[in-house]
Amino acid sequence: MTIRTHTPKLLDTPPVPVQAKLAAAWGTLAFLILYIDYFHLYQPGAIDQIRGGEIFVFDISGGLMSIFFVIILIPGSMILLSTTLPAQVNRAANLVVASLYTPLLVVNAAGATWDYAFYYALTIGIELLIVAFILRSAWTWHRTPANAAGPVTTDLRQELRS
């Protein structure tokens, strides 16, 4: 018979850095943008329209494809930038980019038909919630005052002796 001498503690939930939250949110947004566009291809006539050289009312061209690339490049780049930029620049970048990206997400509803109104309302609504999370996280980024340096010591074991 085994006797347990050590009772496990409850799982610890360490705080997640704001940078990681922002990167995860931008990654989720990029993923959803790609999949929402992919699932658009399942709508009747969508592929025929693309084969005819149009997307919605736009002629397919290098310029249009470049715009599509930039649309997904922005959240993809923000994943990297959210984890590498200094805090002040990071906060500002997230606030500016998320604010400018919001109208772009809403414009995606322009191509919606009434048959798919719920689909577009749901997907764009979730995208907007993610952008709101990004804005809130960046806006409320915890600020800590700079601490004055403590006494200079060369003996790093000083605390252990007391």
Image: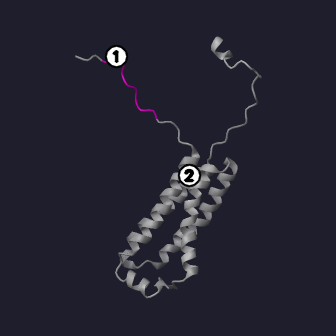
Task: Kindly identify the residue that appears in the image at 36 percent across and 19 percent down.
Answer: 6
Work out whether residue 73 or residue 146 is closer to the camera in this orientation and state it. Answer: 73
| Amino acid at dot 2 | Leu
| Residue 4 can be seen, yes or no | yes
Side of 38 where 70 appears, left or right: right
Task: Kindly identify the residue that appears in the image at 47 percent across and 85 percent down.
Answer: 54
Work out whether residue 74 or residue 117 is closer to the camera in this orientation and state it. Answer: 74
| Residue 162 can be seen, yes or no | no
Q: Position of residue 143 (x, y in %)?
A: 67, 42
Q: Which residue is mark 2?
A: 22
Q: Position of residue 61 (x, y in %)?
A: 54, 83
Q: Position of residue 157 (x, y in %)?
A: 66, 17
- Classify 155 as above or below 30: above
| Amino acid at dot 1 | Thr
The secondary structure that most of the magenta stretch takes on is: loop
Task: Kindly identify the residue that appears in the image at 63 percent across and 50 percent down.
Answer: 84
The span shown in magenta is 4-12
Side of 119 where 19 appears, left or right: right
Side of 118 where 66 appears, left or right: right
* Mark 2–mark 1 distance (CA, rounded to whole Å): 42 Å
- Classify 21 as above or below 28: above
- Classify 72 as above or below 79: below
Q: Which residue is mark 1?
A: 5
User: Alpha-carbon neighbours of circle 1 within 10 Å: few (<14), some, or many (≥20)?
Assistant: few
Label 2 close to label 1 by CB (< 8 Å):
no
Residue lying farthest to the left in this orientation: 1
Numbered disc 2: secondary structure: helix
Q: Quadrant of the C terminus?
A: top right
- Classify 97 as above or below 38: above
Q: Position of residue 124 (x, y in %)?
A: 47, 67
User: Alpha-carbon neighbours of circle 2 within 10 Å: few (<14), some, or many (≥20)?
Assistant: many
